[in-house]
Amino acid sequence: MPATLDEVLRGMRAEAQTYGRNGDRLPPSALVGYADAVAACPDVQLLAWVPEGRAVARAGRDVRWFQRRRAEWLAVGLARETPSGWEYRAVVVPQRGDVGAEETPSLADRLLGAT
């Protein structure tokens, strides 16, 4: 199972402290390794951008569902407009297979207090 972001960051801090105690600098290869480890964390995948068409298909919801939430999501960095259209962070896109997804608000809705 991949490490969580918290685990990767904890390991990075510990290694940096070890280098610091020994009077050494972090080698560039360590920084590349850290970046790769962070990118592989499942929690970071929730920050991936999902194009609106794919979000609609993945969620099984009408595009108007996304449009109603767009302004609030845009204000907190969970939506953006690109030259090719709107994109949403994966964390706000419900999964069609979720049991009760229609009745259960997305994680972003819960965090923002929306229904």
Image (spheres, helix red, strand yellow):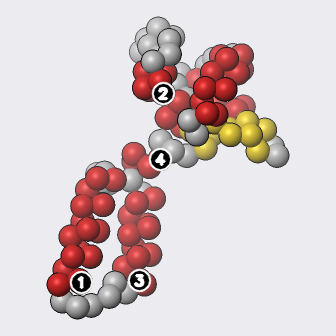
Residue matched to label 4: 45
- Secondary structure at badge 3 equals helix
Q: Which residue shows up at 23% across the image and 83% down it?
A: 20
Residue matched to label 1: 19
Q: Are marks 3 and 2 in contact (CB under 8 Å)?
A: no
- Mark before the other along the chain sequence, 1 or 2: 1
Q: Which numbered dot is residue 29?
A: 3
Q: Can residue 57 be seen in this snapshot?
A: no
User: Gap in Å between the C-alphas at discs 3 and 1?
Assistant: 14 Å
- Mark before the other along the chain sequence, 3 or 4: 3
- Secondary structure at badge 1 equals helix
- Mark before the other along the chain sequence, 3 or 1: 1
- Secondary structure at badge 2 equals helix
Q: Which residue shows up at 23% across the image and 91% down it?
A: 23
Q: Are marks 3 and 1 in contact (CB under 8 Å)?
A: no
* 3 vs 1, front mark: 1
Q: Which numbered dot is residue 108?
A: 2
Residue nearest the viewer, comparing 107 with 20: 20
* 4 vs 1, front mark: 1
- Mark before the other along the chain sequence, 2 or 4: 4
* 2 vs 4, front mark: 2
Question: Type of residue at label 4?
Answer: Gln
Q: Are marks 4 and 1 in contact (CB under 8 Å)?
A: no
User: Gap in Å between the C-alphas at discs 4 and 1?
Assistant: 29 Å
Residue 32: % across, % down: 44, 75
- Mark before the other along the chain sequence, 4 or 1: 1
From what the image shows, is residue 29 above or below residue 69? below
- Secondary structure at badge 4 equals helix
From what the image shows, is residue 70 above or below residue 27? above
